[in-house]
Amino acid sequence: MSDEEHHFEAKADAGASKTYPQQAGTIRKNGYIVIKGRPCKVVEVSTSKTGKHGHAKCHFVAIDIFNGKKLEDIVPSSHNCDVPHVNRTDYQLIDISEDGFVSLLTESGGTKDDLRLPTDENLLSQIKDGFAEGKDLVVSVMSAMGEEQICALKDIGPKN
């Protein structure tokens, strides 16, 4: 063996920590899956029987958790699929800027200013109206595979 030290420079992000493998046959409805590089929530799973050449197939119908697009995929049930690490975090809304960004209060007391208002019209109007009325609002932020988006809203009463 050589005594030289090897230095590797990682130039590309493999995305390994953003997902984990799970056997296709074990993924159920309401679970998560990566289809075409997008994190999705599974809305329908159907499994076909094994054919003449081997594998049972799982047919997934899923909806992208960030843009709501419907995606489909067919995978042999014994193969592994990528499953995204999906986190939901609640933050208190502090401010809404004119350019569509929100200022959120983190649990540690810092602020998070890198999130845009959601594109969903219903949720957008609820947030803007509630903020204009001076209510204390808590937003749920869904994050997966390096993307984050506001996905829900809770009203915790008027500001004191």
Image (cartoon, rainbow, N blue to C red):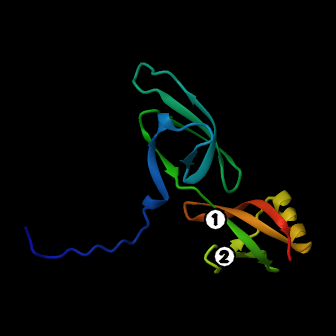
On the image, which quarter does residue 9 sit in? bottom left
Mark 1: which amino acid? Glu
Q: Residue furthest left?
A: 1
Residue 80 position, x and y percent, is 43, 42
The residue carrying pointer 1 sits among few (fewer than 14), some (14 to 19) or many (20 or more) residues within 10 Å by Cα, namely some
- Residue pictured at 63% horizontal, 73% vertical: 107
Quadrant location, the C terminus: bottom right
User: Which amino acid type is shown beneath numbered disc 2?
Assistant: Asp
Q: Nearer the viewer, residue 17 or 139?
A: 139
Q: Are marks 1 and 2 in contact (CB under 8 Å)?
A: yes
| Residue 36 coordinates in the image, percent (x, y) | 55, 50
Residue 42 vertical placement versus 66 (above, below) = above
Q: Residue at x 65, y 74 (%)?
A: 106
Q: Which secondary structure lies at badge 2?
A: strand
Precedes in sequence: disc 1 or disc 2: 2
| 95 to the left or right of 112 | right
Counting from the top left corner in percent of width and height, residue 111 is at: 66, 80
Tell which of 153 and 23 is nearer to you: 153
Q: Which residue is mark 2?
A: 114
Residue 104 position (above or below residue 142): below
Please tell me whether residue 110 is drawn above or below residue 116 in the rendered image: below
**Who is closer to the viewer here, 6 or 94?**
94
Residue pointed to by mark 1: 148
Tell me: 107 left or right of 33: right
Percent position of residue 82, x then y: 48, 48
- Circle 1: element type: strand
Residue occupying the far front of the picture: 160
Residue extending farthest right: 133
Q: Quadrant of the N terminus?
A: bottom left
Residue at horizontal 78 percent and vertical 74 percent from the top:
100
